[in-house]
Image: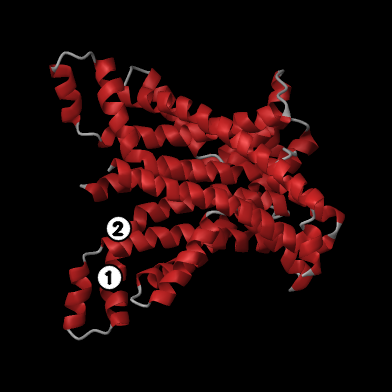
Amino acid sequence: MQNFIEAYSWVNMRFLLEGLWVTVEVSIISIIASFIIGSILGVLRYVKIKYLSRVVGFVVDIVRNLPLILIIFFTYFGLPHLGFKPGIIFAAVLAMTIFESAMLAEIIRSGILAVDYGQMEGARANGMSYVQALWHIVFPQAIKKTIPTIVSQFISLIKDTSLATIIVLPELLNHAQIIYGQNSAYIIPMFVMIAVMYFIICYALSVLSRVLDKKLA
Amino acid sequence: MVYILTHYWSELIQGLGYTLLSSVIALVFSTVIGTMFAIFEVLPNHAMRIIGRIYIEIFRNIPLLVIAMFFYVIIPMYVAKIDGFTAGTIGLTIYTSSFIAETVRAGIQSVDNGQMEGARSNGLTYWQAMRYIVLPQAFKIVIPPLGNQFINLVKNSSVLAFVAGFDLMYQGNSIASLSLDTINSYVVVGLFYLVITLPLSYYMQHLEKRLAN
């Protein structure tokens, strides 16, 4: 018990919260960027433009089937050899965005496919252009249908930011490791605390997605 | 690239072997554990349902790496000496079992309640009805999602690289630092992963389409 009280001293907690803040920061930037890019890629794959959609589909499938850790390594250790040297935070955000965009592209495409084709035909018959119908009629319904899947993808994004400890991104897990590296009695308290922190964020989001799903359905 | 392939072929194959081994072990055990907790969740007993719910929610909402590191750091200190491969595979199993539990539960609940009632009124006990009537139908429904879980497992097994598990990603890193050819090393490792995951994911898409019709 003494270990727990000492481990959760003000200094340590502040250090952990700093790590949590980096986790949140990286997650939010990656969520916004990957939602935008994923939507574009998903739509591009859906609309069947000659060659372009094929290429997008192929790239999305490849990225989706690679481990995220490999992509993180590639952006941080590989890109400098190609003449572009990203910082740690930028490399982490870039890797998360590339991976999650591909995942979201697939989710959003399947959402669009699930929207009844009559919606598109109806919109076209009422004088909308194809792009207008896609943007105003089909896309919003696709997002509505896939909200639970999209949110659970965001939850796994938040959990996956912990993988960036390997490039020493100063996030939650990394800060916990630094603290228990100083005193091995703090190992269990630190694991308990970061598990609780991750749990609160991810569980809150999953409750939110259930509420959203009920409201929109 | 050819240089990496020819010079480090044995390391790559060994890494691939460990990755596959860990994924298969984790798949088998997490399916068993996951099914168990899924059944907990549909039992009439209130306490069991809560136990199932707590297990699933806890391990679904904590990063895999935190779970794997926990086993890698804590178990050797207090319980028994285990290597990184074992610790990582235990972490993988527990993490994946919570996702499989969620999938199987959805499968069980999508089986019409009349199946259970019919079986019960024909004289089967609750467990017999579960085992011979409900679960087989539920598993038919959850085969494609289970396949997707296996793809995730193969990808997620790369956390073994953090705990010295000698998997493909671990070997990829050591090849990258030995050969100093970072780009090509990672490309080769990526290709090795794709050889497993890409055919599987196309097959699962095909299977989903076929079952949907």
Tell me the amino acid under the disc marked 2. Ile
Quarter of the figure with the N terminus of chain B: top right
Can residue A29 be seen here? The reply is yes
Farthest residue toward the front? A10
- Residue A69 in percent (x, y) is at 63, 41
Which chain hosts label 2?
B
**Residue situated in front as seen by the camera: B113 or B48:** B48
Element assignment for label 1: helix
Label 1: chain? Answer: B
Given residues A22 and A111, the one toward you in this image is A22
How far separated are the C-alphas under marks 1 and 2? 11 Å
**Location of residue B151 with respect to A24 vertically, above or below:** below
Residue at 19% x, 28% y: name it: A119
Relative height, residue A110 to residue B17 (above, below): above
Above or below, A96 against B156 in this view is above
* Residue at the image position 33 percent from the left and 76 percent from the top: B44
Residue A136 falls left or right of residue B186: left
Q: Residues within 10 Å of mark 2 (few under 14, many from 20)?
A: many
Residue B8 can be seen in this image: no
**In the visual, does A131 lie left or right of A120?**
right
Relative height, residue B126 to residue A119 (above, below): below
Decide which of tag 1 and tag 2 comes sooner along the chain. Answer: 1
Q: Which residue is mark 2?
A: B141
Question: Which residue lies at the image location 64% right of the left edge and 40% below the top edge?
Answer: A23
Image side of residue A127 versus residue B180, left or right: left
Residue at point 79%, 51% (across, down) = A10
